[in-house]
Amino acid sequence: MHTNVVVDELCGRGWKSPVKQVCKCAYNALPATSSVPMKKRKLESTIHTHLERDSDYTAYLQLDTLLNAQRPLSDPPHHDEMLFIIQHQVAELWIKLIIHELEAAMRKIANDDLPPAVKHLARVKHIQNQIYNQWMVLDTLTPSEYAQFRDVFGKASGFQSPQYRLLEFLLGNKSTSTLSVYKHQEAWYKRLKEALHAPGIFDLFLMYLGRLGFAVPVEAIERDFSRSRDEHPGVVAVLKDIYERPRENWAIYEMCEALMDVSNNFQFWRFHHMKTVERIIGHKAGTGGSSGVSFLRKALDIEFFPELIRVRTEIGAL
């Protein structure tokens, strides 16, 4: 249909004549041909084109290694196995960066330098948003598609990720029993064992509060760090004092909220993980030997910083 006719029809449906006039003017201003040449950008003379193979973008990012790390095992390779591999490899890269930022925050707290620690945790929160949104890509994998290559990776499971386990240890969810999974990986076993027996980020935060003169119970900071923390009413009391006087404790108050952001985002990630698994395999057992969805659902009951949850109940209570 000719554009003028379309405009006439639209105007006939109640469009006012000024609109019709504008539409016709715009149409008449178009060139007679519908072909519009693609714009080109000249290469600037200062751009480097004579590069050494060991100093360019590909070398800096080790792209040859990175882009050749996807090795589908299905034979012939199933189309969707590439999605599955890249999804998990990218997640591991983001987790590596989270650990990098989290450990930096822990060093700052240990050195009584809270503002930069809060900045590191703010970055962690944004990284978590990226890793959370990745699930939407994997959600496009249907049960029938996944079933065609699920058997090729044998006993492999995300539960075995040493980086994920390290992240949980740094955030305070300690578990001696999980170490046995990594005995065949000497370097990771050593690193995880060290993290298991070291203070987590919340332990370091409580130690910091103690150095400032807050009445942090001794047993809350002088303890066996290989065990997950139990909620302590004395710690709740300290946090309540901080939350009820935020202006007097602003940096500490910000740290508390930054920790809650990280904890909440982790829970969102756990939930979406569980629902994605349920969507794709239903209630089958996991490849790593777990019960699958029911095992993942239990993780939602684990809070990294229980006193930061409890204090919200106490604030303003009579």
Image (cartoon, grey):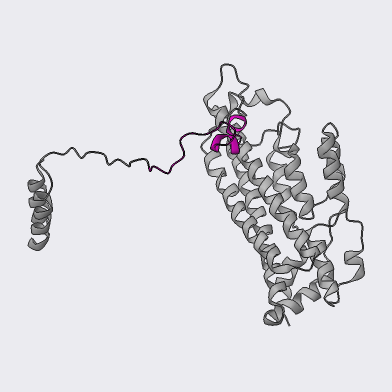
Kindly tell me whether residue 314 is visible in this rendering.
Answer: yes
Quadrant of the rendered structure where residue 267 is?
bottom right
From the viewer's side, name the closer residue of 205 and 42: 42
Q: Quadrant of the N terminus?
A: top left
Kindly give the residue lying farthest to the top in the view shown: 76
Which region shows up in magenta? 44-66
Q: Per the image, is 64 magenta?
A: yes
From the viewer's side, name the closer residue of 13 and 62: 62
Quadrant of the rendered structure where residue 134 is?
top right
Measured as percent of width and height from the top left, residue 106 is found at 76, 59
Task: Please state if 183 lies on the left or on the right of 242 as rendered.
Answer: right
Which residue is rendered at x = 86% and y = 37% of the image? 180
- Establish if 3 lies above or below 75: below
Measured as percent of width and height from the top left, residue 100 is found at 70, 50
Measured as percent of width and height from the top left, residue 139 is found at 54, 40
Kindly tell me whether residue 305 is visible in this rendering.
Answer: no
Task: Please state if 134 lies on the left or on the right of 228 as rendered.
Answer: left
Measured as percent of width and height from the top left, residue 299 is found at 73, 49
